[in-house]
Image (tube, rainbow, N blue to C red):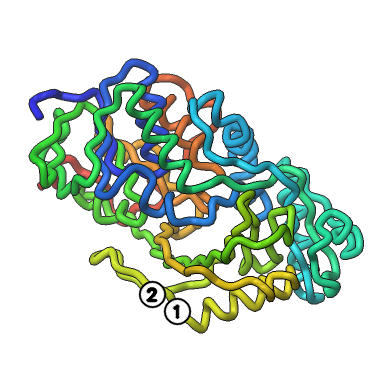
Amino acid sequence: MTTTFDLIVVGGGINGASVALFCARAGMRVALIERDQICRGASGVNAGTLTLQMTRVALIPYALEAHAMWANAPEWLGHDVGVVVCDGLSLAFTEGEEELLTYRAARRREAGAPIEIITGTEAQGIEPGLGASVRVAGWCPIDGFANAYLTGLAYRRALVEAGVALLERTIARGVDETEPFVVNTDRGPIRGRRLVIAGGVWIEPMLAWLGVTLPIKVLINQLSVTERVAPVMRTQVGIASGLLSLKQYPHGTVVIGGGWQGWGNRETGRSGIVPDSIIDNVRLACHAIPALAEARLARSWTGFEAETADVLPAVGPVPGIPEAYVCGSIHSGYTSAPYIAKLLAQCILGQEPERLLFPIDRLILQPASAATVS
């Protein structure tokens, strides 16, 4: 391409796609480079959970704003993403889980999350499908989930309508220059005055193109889905330990998650399930919602998740590299991503972000230097 774009975004998940969309709608000429298809990487294989009960305390104000965005996606995104807004329950089956749940709920409530601790009997009144052994539960009326597949379709349509140049199935291989940025791809060089690195677990090797060392922990989360079954639950259900994420979609399938780890390799992009962990995850789901024991599992899969050393996002300017930015590693990122990406877009557009970003100065192991760019 001979065009010099105002902005190049590398990574087409929820983070990168949102930044690209907001900047394009503000008048920038934007190119979005994605190795697969829009929102078909980690953003397309996660459980689609929209929850405050597993969100880090520091991110609660961001998640509240983002949840409102998800609930009104057709208004600002322009397309439906299959969002179901419902009650959320975080369960405690043991005394230890009850203590953990009570402590965490109190801290999240102080940060603004409307979470209350209720008895097991009260929880069964909200979710009749629960098992009888629930001691207490955290209850949050602001919860729900989106359809990850519909989300990808919706974002792609919105990006096309906004005039973003979509370079799907295009592999970015490095950055040759920074004034303007020249991103090397398997389809040739792409030039842009600004650059956003939004490559999920690949943020670490991508930032290395700019001479920045930012360690990223790679998680390989497992998920499963049942066949279509009669209604067995009407809420979003988890447990205090975080080892369960459970919801039933309108068409009847139940998605089971909770961060149980599979195997995988960032360099090759390959990953796979660990059967014993799938079995334990399903057993836990059936313990929470006993009627699930009658359902058959349709399939299981894995997805990559990025995590920083302090488990807070990496969002903001890249130190030492003017007009370079990073956006990713947001814990419970599906919930908070659209709003946090909107804040970064405000920064890129020269505006004052509504809330503070999460600059990576605290995380990098060596100072950035434009002179180290290959």
Badge number at residue 274: 1
Q: Which residue is the site of mark 2? A: 263
| Amino acid type at image mark 2 | Trp
Q: Is residue 349 visible?
A: yes
**Callout 1: 10 Å neighbours few (<14), some, many (20+)?**
some
Figure quadrant of the N terminus: top left
Task: Tell whether 241 sits left or right of 370.
Answer: right
Task: Tell whether 350 sits left or right of 235.
Answer: left
Q: Residue at x 78, y 53 (%)?
A: 106
129 or 18, nearer to the observer = 129
Badge number at residue 352: none
Mark positioned earlier in the residue sequence (1 or 2): 2
Contact? badges 1 and 2 (CB < 8 Å) = yes
Q: Residue at x 48, y 56 (%)?
A: 46
Position in image of residue 34 (x %, y %): 27, 44
Q: Is residue 289 above or below residue 363?
A: below
Q: Is residue 38 above or below residue 282?
A: above
Q: Residue furthest top?
A: 27
**Callout 2: 10 Å neighbours few (<14), some, many (20+)?**
some
